[in-house]
Image: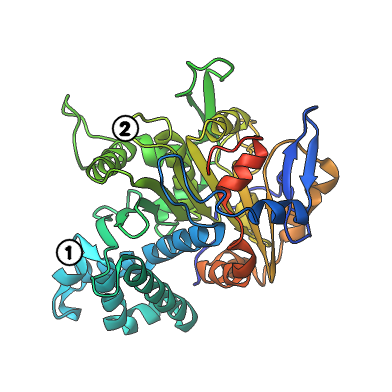
Amino acid sequence: MKLPLFFITQLLSSDLIASTGTVEQSTKDSTGTRVDATPADVANVASQEAFGKFDDDGYQWSNIFEEANDMLDASLLMYPIAELRRVAREFPENFSDPDDILKEPITASEVEQLLVDNAKTLMGFFGNETMGVLNTVMDTIVARQQTDVGKHRKPTATLIDFADDNSNSELVYAIGKDDARKRVTVSFRGSVTMTDWRQDAQIWMEKIANPLAHIKGQPKNIRIHHGFYEYLFYTTTHGETRKDGTLMSKYELIIAQAASLLKKNPGYKLFVTGHSLGAALSSVFAFMAATEESIPSPVTCVSIASPYVGGINFRKSFQHLEETNRLRYLRVANQGDMVTIVPFASLNLGFYKHVGFELKLHPGKFTLTYPKGKRVRRVWRNSIFRNFNPGKATRNHAPAEYDQRLELTKSMLKQVFLNDLYGELHNKTSVK
């Protein structure tokens, strides 16, 4: 997929360390010094039977591979669905029934059929390689539904809302419901329009009130990338209104939709995802959603190819939500994807920090790290200088490359659960 790169204005490095081994989990010991778990340590955690699979309320969690793969599917599908809908609106004469493409809700089987029926249109936009990945994605989603729900029942994954009516000036998102996984998923599209690129380029940090400021030890304010925050929280040009008649922000609209779906489906959990710009938006949205009383804990975010999002206080509050089991976060990043290591610093002199567990995908291997502490001698490994490769820059950022690398890690990552890693990190076993 030939997607433009995130707007890069700095040649700066990252402080999140990735090892060259198979698996690395980085934490702090009791003295506050950063320590690295060995591959054997992680394998030992992963081998504990049933550990990490169930919450106290009986919710069944998938392993890291399945969670990452499912959310990559959701992120990947945002592009072709949005493109099909755009063409159906602008050139309805090219379709026998454009309303079939624009209808909501729509099932996973129906989405798959639309991709098949309109493969020629999509091929011109995405190319043969990405179309092959898209077909595999839809086959996987439908097959999973048939297996989990029952072969004699129809697949039950449903796209509830695809919000792209004003995509030239506002973010694009989708909300889906997966009855097999008991998930409500919010997915954000990555950068496509000029407005998207302008939001990417606004790399100064915006200081906002911390929703956790009432908690002892939490900072009064946090700083978030202005462009990402503006896209979610500033006034929209159209849509639902508040009680006072003013327009809701996108965040208010999406969180209300998600809360309503979760209320109608007791026992379901909220998952959030996106690729590139969509990954950044998903990170901010998940953080805020985890502070909402109307959203059951924990919220899970799996971001794909995310740039930096916030500063040190944002990370501190983010980690508090992780420690209190209100937020789970897996940040998937390809080695060599420069988007994931910018912007390092804000134009108003703030420094960005990554959050959550990082799953770094190398060709044929992976690393798992958690951003606590800093080792200057290793900063070079994630610097833009080391990752700079003009010939592969676009490819390393493309969803198709993420799909291929993730597939190579399948056998090992199926043994690891994100809850296990959090349990080890915080020295507690909040899951069975």
Q: Position of residue 62 (x, y in %)?
A: 48, 56
Q: Residue at x 71, y 50 (%)?
A: 11
- What residue does disc 1 label? 103
* Above or below, 136 relative to 167: below
Q: Position of residue 299 (x, y in %)?
A: 43, 41
Q: Is residue 307 visible?
A: no
Residue 35 lies in quadrant: top right
**Which one is in front, 281 or 104?**
104
* Above or below, 343 relative to 99: above
- What residue does disc 2 label? 294
- Is 90 placed left or right of 325 in the picture? left
Q: Residue at x 19, y 60 (%)?
A: 104
Q: Amino acid at mark 1?
A: Lys
Q: Residue at x 63, y 38 (%)?
A: 352
Q: Amino acid at mark 2?
A: Ser
**Which one is in front, 83 or 374?**
374
Residue 298 lies in quadrant: top left
Mark 2 or mark 1: name the one nearer the start of the chain: 1
Residue 322 lies in quadrant: top right
Tag of residue 84: none
